[in-house]
Amino acid sequence: MDTNGNTSHEESVPLKTGVEPDVEKASDIVIENVPPVRLYYKVSENPPLHLNILFAIQQALLPIANVLSVSIIVADLVCASDDQEIKAQLLGTTFMMSGISTMLMCTLGVRLPIFQGPSAGYVIPLLGLATLKEWKCPTSDELETFYSNSSMNATDLTADLPMPREVIYRQLGKLQGSLMVAGVIHLMIGFTGLVGAVSRFIGPITIVPALLLLVLYLHKITVKFAQTYWGTAVATTVCGLILSLYLRAHKTPIPFWSRKRGFHITWYPLHQVFSILISVIFGWILSSILTSAGVLSDDPNSKEYYARTDARTEIISLNPWFYFPYPGQFGESTFDAAAFAGAMVATIMSVVDSICDYNACARMCFVPFPPSHALNRGIFWEGLMSFFAGTTGAGHATSSYGGNIGAIGITKVASRRVFQGLAIIYILFAMLGKLNAAFITVPNSVLGGVMVLYFGIFLGIIMSNLQFVDLNNTRNLAILGISTLVGFMVPYYIAQNPDKIDTGNRSVDRTLTMLGSNGIFVAGFLACFLDNTVTGTIESRGLAAHLEGEDTVKQKIEYEEGMEVYDLPFLPQFLKNSIFIRYCPIFPKYEKERNK
């Protein structure tokens, strides 16, 4: 037990050169034993380069299912489901926007290990747009009419007429312009400090119902991937559980030899810090064996087909060697009211979701909850990248991704540098088409099995927020239960009665329908409203631990690092002393340094 009252197993000892673990000597063999810790690498610590690369690859593999699925949904929405070139460009653009957003968020944004990618919050509005008449793709008869009136020689066309590029570009243009406007509003919410002020009213009672509905929605995506072959999915999940949980108290013996120290063995928790990467490799190998043995169906119309390792190998040949997404690559941007309404719904949910994710990530990294300036800065960069995602035609913005936060809990690696490495990998994926295509060939069933791991851990993190709430208080229990139930009820009712909302204004009807069909928004909004209007103390509501400067001594002892985690790097002293920095809500306050 140390001077702060922590036991040795709670100390964070980074596994890097310079650490002196327990050493036992037996003849010429030195055996090193690294003690168990809460985090092997803290937020501000940097793993050795070779480990950092492996950690980054591990984190990069997790969101690939979402990256692929969202880009496919966008392609379907803009009528490009059969245009492989457009689909490859959309995928590369999604990789590029995710990589740049992640780099900016970890370096200049909230400065926590956060992955920014296409989240479920943007999928729901896109699916809602697909049901609108003006977003329907041309029918076969309409395509025949188009080609008969065009200069293209229709006699050379097969019965399956290709979708004209002008139709695809027109649909993408509507998404681009609407997303750019929503992105400007998004970044202004952060730059003006509004999110920092609003966050004081968003506590655990708001966070839990909103993110609970998000994870429960994600179970559909998880099943979609896992059901391609349940055997591989279960095997992947079980492998990860054994490595990260059942064997968490054990170490892997790794032999080393150096000229200075000779042959020695280091007991390193290799199987835990790389549990997800090992699980993916294990599932991939198992799928390859099943594919070679003919166990999995080779019928492209069968669900089992996408559990094969050769299901998407044609993507490698279709993707170009080099590709660089750029603004305006799909033509000029236009504006569409329905697309803007959907983008604004996603923006509102993205802000709430990001605040929740930042708090969840802080808990997982054992650091204080983000102060107002860090929240404002995170939302500012998120909005700015949403704007640029619109200019490049990605069709969606980027938002914080909870699955990678859950992976931190499994691997105990919370280093910011790992996620910066992830960002570089995704940028390379975008520019090297063959490389991103190779990673996309991971079987769906393997991705589904991995999803069970990190979405499950993320759900546990969400529920852990309730430890700050007085659950013996009927007020809190009522708000949690009612908001969660209504979050299920309203979307279900609208799904059964899609034309029930009729205000006389079609745009208002579509906006209300989109809002009501989003259970995350319904549950979060109702919980926030009730939590701030029904009388209750700050302590019983669980807000005391979330408000800056109100940490108890006990909570401070549990932290691995302090508020310095959120300070901006490379900020010159003359800027710290400037009036702009003093009053701009996205910068820390440097009162102590000015006083000195």
Image (cartoon, rainbow, N blue to C red):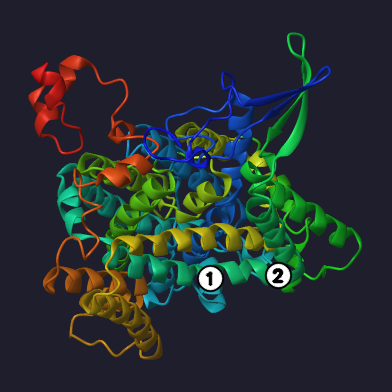
Q: Quadrant of the C terminus?
A: top left
Q: Which residue is mark 1?
A: 219
The residue at the point 48 percent across, 41 percent down is 10
462 up-or-down from 135: above or below? above
Would residue 532 be found to the left or right of residue 275 on screen?
left
Q: Residue 449: x percent and y percent? A: 66, 62
Q: Which residue is mark 2?
A: 228
526 up-or-down from 244: above or below? below
Amino acid on which the number 2 mark rests in the picture: Thr
**Crowd around label 1: few <14 · some 14–19 · many ≥20 (10 Å):** some
Q: In the structure shown, which secondary structural element does the residue marked by tag 2 occupy? A: loop
First-in-chain label (2 vs 1): 1
Q: Residue furthest right?
A: 293
The residue at the point 23 percent across, 60 percent down is 202
Would residue 135 be found to the left or right of residue 577 on screen?
right
Q: Residue 221: x percent and y percent? A: 55, 68
Q: Residue 566: x percent and y percent? A: 30, 35
Q: In the structure shown, which secondary structural element does the residue marked by tag 1 occupy? A: helix
Which one is in front, 88 or 310? Answer: 310
Which one is in front, 307 or 222? Answer: 222
Amino acid on which the number 1 mark rests in the picture: His
Q: Is residue 336 visible?
A: no
